[in-house]
Each structure stands twice: as structure tokens, then as C-alpha cells.
Image (cartoon, rainbow, N blue to C red):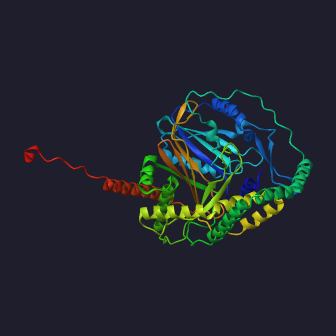
Amino acid sequence: MSPLDAAFLVLEDADPHSGLHIGSVGIFEGPAPSHELFVEAMLRKLTLLPRYRQKVRPVPFSLGPPVWIDDEAFDINYHVRRTALPRGADDAVLRRVVGRVMSHRLDREKPLWEAWVVEGLPDGRWALLSKVHHCLVDGISGTDVLAVMLDLTPDAEWPPAQEWTPRPAPSGAFLMVQAIAHRMTEPVALATTMGRLLRSPRTALRTSTVLARGLAALGTAVLPVHVTSLLGESGAHRRYRFVAVPFEDVQTVRRAYGGTINDVALAAVTAGFRALLESRGEHPAKHSVRTLVPVSTRAPGDEGIRDNRVSALLLDLPVWLTDPIEQLRAVQVGMARLKASGEAEAGAWTTRLAQHLPFDAVQSTLRTAFRLPQRSLTTVTTNVPGPSFPLYAFGRRMLHAYPYVPIGDRLRIGVAMFSYERELSFGITCDAATTPDADVLVQGIVRGTRAMVERARAERQRATPVPKTAPPAAAAR
């Protein structure tokens, strides 16, 4: 396990109320598959993902990061679960179910994932709720349970059934010897990496310049944020909301004002947080809402790698601005500045360097840092691009897909975004005890998107020349 993967376990241990699992909610046309059919499909598809039959094994005395070992008692029926909504239930009931499921941590003694089939949605629909620990996957690679089950066509064939025999678990003594041997070779690996870099002075200079600039930017970004009710201690229970906006609306704004889809989505989230602060009687001042924006560091060809390959940017959402287009412009400028600052590269190099350091020292540093109440971040906003074409499970078309992002470490709200087919969806995770007004944030996101779209359409109408009409025939004569 990489130090970054292990960090999610350390962070979870440091916060008794957090469960650091990502997830998704896929809503499908009916009818729902039977339990037996779902189990058969999962068993066949798990042959492509051996990690889903493995569990975490700590190395004695933390001499090295935890390792993945086969679960000799693996039982698919523990991970595949089923529930049903009461008759006449609506999406609000589904959201409550998601909140309850996500409020509980995954069992460290078993592979760290669950899949829930939820029956009884309106119009005969059903949902597939996935739950995967962040140490297993970073979300950007798309390897959660929902992605495992999806097909490109309604008649896609499953992988052939295969027998699975778990490998014997290594002894603690073996893991200790392996970790000590790895630790002894790490200085050589670090020297080799540095030597490879120094062989190209131009590359070394460019890299060091980017890292210095990035570390300086990170130093500024971790200054405390303005105190609001969005930041503070949280409980163990989660409140979940989801909403979707037409993807064409987002494209309309992007075409009118430039930037990226993510810029438009962050501007909509900015409007939502401004509405939430105002509804609580709080002033949306500068540096009130600083968000962690995950950035993939996967190189081309690394998409199939299952561990975390992610860094982050720290962006102040411009909640102090009232005009939706000014908010969008500020987001565009802020994201462009952060991308040029080297923050993401500095974060990636920091995690890369941690791979060459003794794990017990890295773990001790992380635990000390996590025990300190952080005041530099208010929320997390992650955007994962999805396909623009339909996907299927068991021959049923997926109609909607909503993401789930975990919260913890004094963050009371997190927002995940996912584009699928003709819509951009927002999944909002909240601390249930301190965010009873989550719907205000949702409505603010929708209103913010609508305001940007209306302005973009008005801009397009003003920019479109009015065709000159020919004079009437009588007047011409």
C-alpha cells in the first residue's frame, strides 16, 4: 500500500466520526435483478479486480505501510446487500437510505467495499448504491462497485466464471523482514531517482522551480479561513442530497464565457454556499469557503492502476461576490492561477517523497497533524467526468448517476460532481447534526446554474446580428 493510500486509514482512525469511503448511486430502469443474479455477476466481474477479495493487514510495529492480503474467509453475501423502500416512497426516502448506509464505517477485517441493491423506487426503478474505502481507490480512476457492474451495451457478456483460491496469509515475521529489507533499499531508490533528475540540469532546474513555487503557494493557502458555521466538530451521522442540471446548460455557460466545465460547476457550488451562509445570517466574506479540489496525477496509461494517484489545489470560492458571472470569472482566474502555481506538483512530489521515508515516521507525522484542529479548509469539491453515452447493468439502462464524497476533519459539507449522458449531477454529503438546512445549498446550486445560463443566453442573443429584412414589394415599386 502506498503512503497516500495508508494516509486515508490513518485519517479515519484519527477522527472517530468519519468513514472515509467514496461511493455512488446509480438509478436504473426496472425491474431490479434478483439477488442470485447480482451475486453471480459480481463473482464473475471480481475476477478483473483481485483487490476486492483482499483485506488490509498492518505490518507489525508499523515498520512499513499496511499490505493487501487475500481474505481467506471471503463471503460475497456479506458485501452484496439488499433493501427496499416502502410503498409510495420518493427520492427523499432514497437519500435518507444513502445517508444511513454511508454513516457506518467499513469493517477493516474484511475487503473494504459494499454494494446495495435498493428496490421500490418510483416508476419501477431501482438503485445500486456502492461504497468503497478511499484507500482502495481514488474515485478519479472510476473503479468503484458501480463502475464494475456497468456495461456499454444491454446485451454485454460477463467474464467467464473462474474458481478463486485465496493465497495463504503471510506471517507477521515475514512482513517485518520484508519491510526491513524494503527500508534498507529505499535510500538507494531515492538516490537513483535524484541521480536521474540531476543528469538533466535543465529538467532539474525546471522541477525545483515549480516545486519551490508550489510549496510557497501551499504555504499561503493553508492560512486559517474566516470562521463560519461551515467548519467545526461533526457527528457520526450523514445527511445526503443529490440534484442534477442539464449538461447542455453547463456547456452553454462554458461556450459563452470560456474556461472549463469544472469552472462552471464550482461557480454553481459557490452560489450554493453563499445562499447557505446568508440563510444562516452569516456574512459571506473573503476566505470564508476554501475548498480542496482533488487533481488527478495519473500519467497516460495509468488509468487501470487501482491505488490513489491524486494531488490537490486549494481554492477560495468567491462567495463574497453577488453576481453569478463575476463568481464564474473569479473561479476561472483562481483555478488558472493555482494550476500555474505548481501546488498540485508540489503535493504530488511530497507524496512521492513519502514513499522513500520510514513509514512509522510518516504515520507518526500524519497522526500528529490530524490531531490538530485544522482551520485551513471549509469543504471539498471533487469533479469526475463521466461518459456522454448510456451505460447498462443486467440489460437495464442507467438513468442517473450521483456521486458521494466523504467528509471529516472538521469539514461538515462535501460536494462531488459527476457528468453522465445529458446531465451534471451534484452529490452533497453533510454532517446530519449541524447541517439540517442542506436543501438550501442544493437550491442555491440550482439557482446559481440557472442564473448563469440565463445570462449566457442573453449574451448570445445580443451577439447575434439581426438579419435585415427586405422592404415591402409596394414600397419597392
Instruction: Say above or below: 248 vs 268.
Output: above
Q: How many marks?
A: 0
Q: Is residue 74 above or below residue 287?
A: above
Q: Position of residue 32 (x, y in %)?
A: 56, 33
Along the line of sight, the residue nearer the viewer: 161 or 110: 161
Does residue 243 appear to the left or right of 104 in the view shown? Answer: left
Residue 235 in sight from this viewpoint: no
At 83% from the left and 58% from the top, the residue drawn is 191
For the residue pair 342 and 149, the one nearer the viewer reads as 342
Image quadrant in which the C terminus is located: top left
- Residue 334, percent across and down? 53, 64
The picture places residue 350, in percent across and down from the top left corner, at 73, 61
| Residue at (46, 47) in percent of width and height | 247
Residue 154 lies left or right of residue 44; in this view the side is: left
Q: Nearer the viewer, residue 213 or 428?
A: 213
Using residue 438 as the reference point, say whether residue 129 is left or right of it: right
Residue, x 88% and y 54% (percent of image)? 185
Residue 198 % position (x, y): 77, 60
Task: Report the front residue among 16 and 247.
Answer: 247
Asked if residue 248 can be seen in this view, the reply is yes
